[in-house]
Image (cartoon, helix red, strand yellow):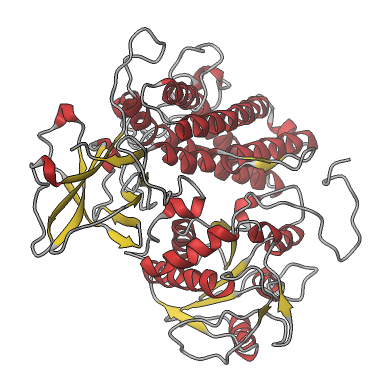
Amino acid sequence: MSEMDKPHLEGTTPIIHTPDQRVRVFISSTLDELAPERAAARQAILELHLTPVFFEAGARPYPPQELYRAYLAQSDIFVGLYWQRYGWVAPNMEVSGLEDEYRHSDGKPRLIYVKTPAPAREPRLQTLLDRIRDDGISYQKFGTPDELRELLANDLAEVLTDRFSDVHQELDVHQEPLADHSHPTLASGPPASATQRLPIWLEKHFSLVALLALLVVLVVSGVVIGLPLLQGRNQVSSQPSNTHAALGQLVFLSSGQVGDNSSQGIADTISLQMQIQRGPAAGKQYYAWLLPEQSNAEAPPILLGTIIKHEQVGQMTYRDPQHTNMLSSTSRLLVTEQDASITPLTPSTDPSDWRYVASIADIHPSGTPYGPYSLLDHIRHLLAKEPTLESHGLHGGLVNWLQRNTNKLVEWSLSARDAWQSGNTADLGLMRQQLTRILIYLDGISYAPAELPKNIPYAGLVDAPTGNIGLLPPDSQLNAFSVVTHIDFHLQGVAASPGASTSQQQETAKILAVMNHINAWLKQVRDDDRRLLMMSDQQLQQSAALTLLNDLQMNAIYASSGQIDQATGARQEGGQWVYQETQHLASMEVMLASS
């Protein structure tokens, strides 16, 4: 019997797994009025390579109260965002879900943020804020999403340093009275004499937590230096290296500052971490430069900055001010040793000043199914620009459109189900519109109309160009271009490319396994969607239609966010994970420059 099928005692919470195993940060707020702030909080959490947990991001076949309490129970840190609204009070509740989430966060570190000004704050929300004050928890005020993002990133870093720095000790809990402090109190409900242990999985990863505590002090522009350390990937060895041994890694990352249809905000951040055995000499500094491939050597270099050295480890993070996708035009790293008194405009042309190099291989193989693409080409098609997408006005690479469009499927499937639950015959038209949008995103605007009933209009339902390319190939045109099939093709190409590292090949295998699940979930979404579109208005009002709508919604959520395999308990990831994980392929191994 699966965990879903097992009965549970009244007053207890069933095992409903959250979609991750990293440090989890639960975000509590009303939804509509603080949507931009929730997005900013999510980005701050992701930049620290933690996992944001949102109630609406984890729809499951459980009652809402049961669901958010289970997700909250499995989270490690509670973040409360408040402004003017108190939230809806369900018929069987005395308080809103917003206040209920706060009550059930007892025993966790709490970070509280209040947006100002709030001229129309509801009385019950003010009462909740008064309770927070009486609980001895301080909070910070903010005015804009960017301000919240910066505050939260700094405060989370402090929580991880102060609270998780020694996993072998039990932690005393301390609370301070409410005030306009510069930092929020890391309060957790038990009295001062109570002690609390870290999650077992975090104790097993103590080395990562200790490294994170070290890196907290190196925050630059809101991004923690050395993100690869937080992932436990390619850690720098302290052992001496020869000229051909990897001394570290450069990784392209994404800030998330993405436009509606552009490659901005993707691969706009560089994280560099490497072993530095000696130097630089007195009066000199190590400068990191990002260079184009040799076939485009006339393009200007990008000065990433100076490398911060701590003992024998050098590291730095750079974010493009305009959030430009740097992977689309660069593929090599050069570290030079130059005069520290004046920042150079260009890298030294004297090879004796070159200290470290790295590159993504740009070798075009022959006689393979993946020619004429190089490793660099495959990675760019996935993360920066893909020619067929570009010709249809879709920018940002294949995995960008996988995660964007699967998110839209979730949005429309929820709306279609809500239309059914309204019981209003007038909402049947809205339901059909949402189901039609889903089919267009799955098959593409060129093929979807052939599968629609003749009486269903489709023109204008999906804005161009986002519906031009389908997520799946249509059944009648299996060789047609689609997002899923070409992600698979280029992932396989990465693994087979000359110059691909072992870690890139291993990463590719993981992502391909996830893509198999996503493909199956999307096909089930399409099957459910087709069956619903063929129903009459009378059939759409029957319970059988709701069963299909629920199945469609759940598979759309799985394709976007993943699920827990109820038989094994293993996590099966979705499109959001693929988007994040594929960025690890955009990496270069740093080596000593040849003398």
- Judge by depth and name the residue closer to the eye, 523 or 493: 493
Where 275 falls versus 470 (above or below)? Answer: below
Lateral position of residue 12 relative to residue 407, left or right: right
Q: Quadrant of the C terminus?
A: top left
* Place of residue 146 in the rendered image (x, y in percent of width and height, measured from the top left): 37, 67
Q: Which residue is drawn at 34% across and 33% down?
A: 394
Mark yes or no: residue 335 visible: yes
Q: In which quarter of the image is the N terminus?
A: top right
Where 482 falls versus 71 (above or below)? Answer: above
* Place of residue 82 in the rendered image (x, y in percent of width and height, measured from the top left): 53, 75
Mark yes or no: residue 436 visible: no
* Place of residue 440 in the rendered image (x, y in percent of width and height, measured from the top left): 50, 28
- Judge by depth and name the residue closer to the eye, 107 or 60: 107
Lateral position of residue 565 relative to residue 9, left or right: left
Q: Which residue is drawn at 60% across and 52% down?
A: 57
Total numbered circles = 0
Classify residue 362 by image quadrant. top left
In this view, which residue lies farthest toward the top? 367
Where 575 falls versus 189 (above or below)? Answer: above
Lateral position of residue 253 relative to residue 90, left or right: left
- Judge by depth and name the residue closer to the eye, 192 or 535: 192
* Place of residue 171 in the rendered image (x, y in percent of width and height, measured from the top left): 66, 78
Q: Residue at x 43, y 19 (%)?
A: 481
Where 360 falls versus 354 (above or below)? Answer: above
Classify residue 261 by image quadrant. top left
